[in-house]
Image (tube, rainbow, N blue to C red):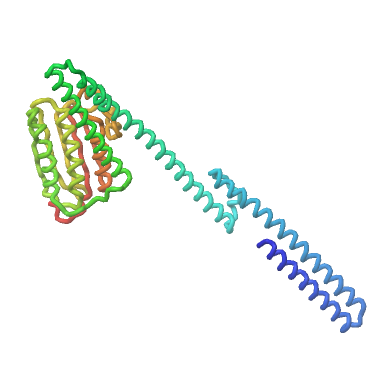
Amino acid sequence: MKYSFDKKNSILKIIYILIILMMNISVYFIVKDISVIIIVLLCSMVIIMLFFIREKLYKNYLEDIFVQLSDMLTTIINMKDEKVFSTIEDDLFSKLQHQTIKLTGILKNQKKQIEDEKNDIKVLISDIAHQLKIPLTNLKMYGEFLQEEDLTEEERKEFTNVILLSLDRLSFLIESMIKMSRLEGGVIQLNKHINYLSDTVLTAIGQIQKKANQKNISIEFQEIDKVKITYDKNWICEGVFNILENAVKYTDINGKIKVTIQSYEIFVRIDIEDNGIGIKEEELPKIFARFYRGKDVGDIEGIGIGLYLTREIVSKHGGYIKVKSKEGTIFSIFLPNNSLGSK
């Protein structure tokens, strides 16, 4: 490409010189005054010199521009926000530089996002390994115990129960992780339809009712407003159930749980209130993190995925969750009020 341009440029120079030469020859034959001929010849020489000087200057100018463009590309490669061209003049190069700085910013954000995702994957793998370790260790250890021939029938039942509990925990953990990974990866598409929210909430209450009855915990449901909105009833049921399950776990025997639905102009609100052990103020920002469990939960069963899943579900619906905890805890789920005639 450069060879073709140089060739054309050389041809253009030759043509330019030939034209001036022919002009001088014509003047020589037409005008007989030697002084005029000399003046025309000198002027032609000056024009030719100016032409070559201009070409040299333009070539130097282009080389300088290419050097600056190279520096600008280097800033992109090194992801720096350095300014190469003057920002005072509103010309093509300053505009190009502005776009380059914007591109550098985009590339920086993408690089940071990729690094954050890599770190998240590392943390996730570490968390999964930690969570799987306990049930797998129990399965191995108690499986070896069962191979001993001098076990009593009572010991055999006890070890078998531990193995079954470990299998249940392992199954629940894997199922929760599959849900979590699908939600995070966007594999699951929400199947939204217009439904009464009370039907979904009552389904979630029905699923947790047996565990509540075992602790003699009463669940009160109050529908302040009849709400009909567009949402995925299966996933919202999952989210509400996760909060209710935590409420039952961390509420003492003979406790109370109250579930309320109320409609506002922009959002629909589901309150789940319990009189359980509560959550310390410093722990409130952490409770939705993957595998996080509070310091006061003791030996209560759980792996710290439920609230994380619930937040992801609600977030994908365009909503959010608020938590208050003093004497007991109130989880408030806010979903977009996207249907008319909710009340």
Q: Residue furthest top?
A: 150
Q: Quadrant of residue 152?
A: top left
Left or right: where 97 falls relative to 24 = left
Is residue 104 left or right of 289 when viewed as pictured? right
Q: Residue at x 26, y 40 (%)?
A: 311
Left or right placement of residue 36 versus residue 284 in this view: right
Q: Can you tell which quarter of the image residue 114 is in?
A: top left
Which of the two residues, 11 or 316, is positioned nearer the viewer here? 11
Say how many tags the image has: 0
Q: Is residue 182 left or right of residue 198?
A: right
Q: Which residue sits at x=7%, y=29%? A: 216
Viewer-nearest residue: 174 or 78: 174
**Quarter of the view holding residue 9:** bottom right
Q: Position of residue 336 (x, y in %)?
A: 23, 49
Q: Nearer the viewer, residue 211 or 326?
A: 211
Q: Where's residue 270, x and y in %? A: 17, 42
